[in-house]
Image: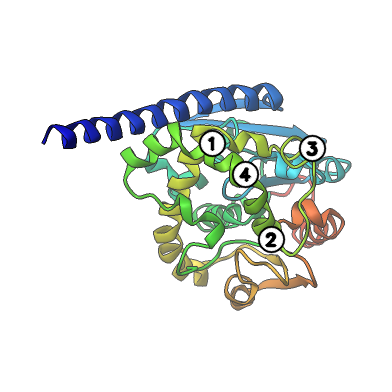
C-alpha cells in the first residue's frame, strides 16, 4: 500500500510540474506575441466587450467591413487587401469578439448572432452605413448573421470560403478545439494548449493552407503569433462549439435573405467543402465563383483574385451617394 501511495504521489507531482511548466511557458509566449504584434488600430466598447478594428480610406466612400475566420485576426486582411481596397473605399477590418485585441465578457457572446450584434454595434458607433461585408470562413457565417438580422444596414455580401451550413464533424485541423467543458477549456488554454500549438504549428499551417504553401511571414505580417496566447485558444474553442449549433439554426433562415452578393471559394479547399458550403448559396441569389487549385486561405494566398472579387460585389451593390437603403 505504501508503495502505491508513493507512486500515486509521484504521478500527481509530475502532472503538477507539467501544468506549472505549461503555465509559465504560456505566459512567456503570450508576452512575446503581444510585444511582436501590438494592436494596429483602436477599440470601441460595446455591450459584452470591446471591438478592435483598423480603419482606412475615405469615410465618405463606400464602406467595406472585413470579418476574419476561426483562430484568426484582422491581420489576415491587412496582410494584402486593406491597403489595396482603401484607395477608393472606406475599409474597416475588425477583430471578431474575443479574437486579436477584441474581447468578449462571457461565452454567451460566442454565438453567431451575438458576434454579429457586437460588430454591428461597433459600426453604429463609427457611424458607418450601408456595409458591404467581406467575411472569410467563420467570418462568413457572422456576416450572414448580420445580413439576416440587419438587412437594411447591409448593402452586400462578399463571402470568401464561408461557413454557411453544417459541416458534420469538425475539420481535423480544428478538432483539438472541440472542448465543451468551460473549465477544461480554460485549464488547457492556460497550460498545455500554447506549447502544443507552437510545436504543431507547421503541421497545422500545412493543413489549413493546403494545397498551397503558407507564407514564411504568416506569424508576423498576418498576425499568426497572436494565436499563441491562452485567450486565442479559449476563444477559438468557444467558436467551434457554438458555431456547430449556430449554423444549424441559421441556415434555414437563408430563404429570407434579402442582401445581394457572391461567394468565392478555392476549388481545393480542404477545410470547408465548396460543394457543401458555397454552391448551395446560389439558391439564395448569391453568385458563386471558384479559383482552380486554390485552398482555404485565399485572402492571403490569392489577394489579386480576392480584390477583384470584392470589387465586383461592391460595384454591383453600390448605393449612390446620399441615398440610404
> Considering only order in the chain, which callout, 2 or 4, is on the residue closer to the N terminus?
4
> Considering only order in the chain, which callout, 4 or 3, is on the residue closer to the N terminus?
3
- Circle 2: element type: loop
- Circle 3: element type: loop
Q: Give how far apart the Cα atoms at labels 3 and 1 are.
A: 45 Å
Determine the image quadrant of residue 109. top left
- Residue named by callout 1: 195
- Residue named by callout 4: 72
* Vertical placement of residue 124 versus 256, above or below: above
Q: Give how far apart the Cα atoms at labels 3 and 2 are.
A: 33 Å
User: Which of labels 3 and 2 is toward the front?
Assistant: 2
Residue 8 position in % (x across, y down)? 22, 35
The residue carrying pointer 2 sits among few (fewer than 14), some (14 to 19) or many (20 or more) residues within 10 Å by Cα, namely many
User: Which of labels 1 and 2 is toward the front?
Assistant: 1
Residue in front for this viewpoint, 6 or 75: 6
> Considering only order in the chain, which callout, 2 or 3, is on the residue closer to the N terminus?
3
Q: Give how far apart the Cα atoms at labels 1 and 2 are.
A: 25 Å
- Residue named by callout 3: 60
- Residue at 79%, 48% in the rendered image: 215
Residue in front for this viewpoint, 281 or 58: 281
Task: Using the rendered image of the protein, determine whether residue 21 is visible from the camera's viewpoint.
Answer: yes
- Residue at 47%, 49% in the rendered image: 239
Q: Give how far apart the Cα atoms at labels 3 and 4 are.
A: 29 Å
Asked if residue 30 lies left or right of residue 288, the reply is left
- Residue at 60%, 42% in the rendered image: 199
- Residue named by callout 2: 296
- Circle 4: element type: loop
The disc at residue 213 is none
Residue 85 position in % (x across, y down)? 83, 46
Residue 164 position in % (x across, y down)? 55, 65
- Residue at 46%, 37% in the rendered image: 192
> Considering only order in the chain, which callout, 2 or 1, is on the residue closer to the N terminus?
1
Amino acid at each position: 500500500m505504501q508503495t502505491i501511495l508513493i507512486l500515486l504521489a509521484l504521478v500527481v507531482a509530475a502532472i503538477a510540474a507539467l501544468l506549472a511548466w505549461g503555465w509559465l511557458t504560456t505566459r512567456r509566449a503570450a508576452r512575446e506575441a503581444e510585444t511582436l504584434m501590438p494592436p494596429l488600430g483602436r477599440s470601441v466598447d460595446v455591450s459584452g466587450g470591446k471591438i478592435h478594428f483598423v480603419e482606412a480610406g475615405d469615410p465618405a466612400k463606400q464602406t467595406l467591413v472585413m470579418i476574419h475566420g476561426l483562430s484568426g485576426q484582422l491581420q489576415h486582411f491587412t496582410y494584402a487587401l486593406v491597403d489595396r481596397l482603401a484607395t477608393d473605399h472606406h475599409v474597416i477590418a475588425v477583430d471578431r469578439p474575443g479574437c486579436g485585441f477584441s474581447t468578449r465578457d462571457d461565452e454567451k457572446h460566442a454565438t453567431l448572432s451575438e458576434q454579429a450584434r457586437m460588430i454591428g454595434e461597433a459600426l453604429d458607433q463609427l457611424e458607418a452605413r450601408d456595409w458591404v461585408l467581406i467575411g472569410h470562413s467563420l467570418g462568413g457565417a457572422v456576416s450572414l448573421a448580420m445580413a439576416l438580422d440587419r438587412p437594411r444596414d447591409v448593402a452586400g455580401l462578399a463571402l470568401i470560403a464561408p461557413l454557411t451550413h453544417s459541416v458534420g464533424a469538425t475539420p481535423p485541423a480544428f478538432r483539438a478545439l472541440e472542448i465543451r467543458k468551460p473549465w477544461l477549456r480554460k485549464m488547457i488554454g492556460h497550460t498545455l494548449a500554447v506549447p502544443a500549438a507552437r510545436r504543431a504549428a507547421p503541421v497545422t499551417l500545412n493543413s489549413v493552407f493546403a494545397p498551397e504553401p503558407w507564407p514564411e511571414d504568416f506569424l508576423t505580417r498576418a498576425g499568426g503569433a497572436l494565436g499563441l496566447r491562452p485567450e486565442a485558444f479559449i476563444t477559438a474553442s468557444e467558436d467551434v462549439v457554438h458555431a456547430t449549433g449556430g449554423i444549424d439554426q441559421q441556415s434555414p433562415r437563408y430563404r429570407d435573405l434579402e442582401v445581394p452578393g457572391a461567394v468565392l471559394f478555392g476549388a481545393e479547399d480542404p477545410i470547408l467543402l465548396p460543394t457543401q458550403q458555397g454552391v448551395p448559396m446560389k439558391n439564395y441569389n448569391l453568385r458563386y465563383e471558384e479559383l482552380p487549385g486554390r485552398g482555404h486561405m485565399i485572402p492571403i494566398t490569392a489577394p489579386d483574385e480576392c480584390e477583384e472579387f470584392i470589387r465586383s460585389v461592391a460595384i454591383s451593390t453600390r448605393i449612390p451617394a446620399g441615398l440610404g437603403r
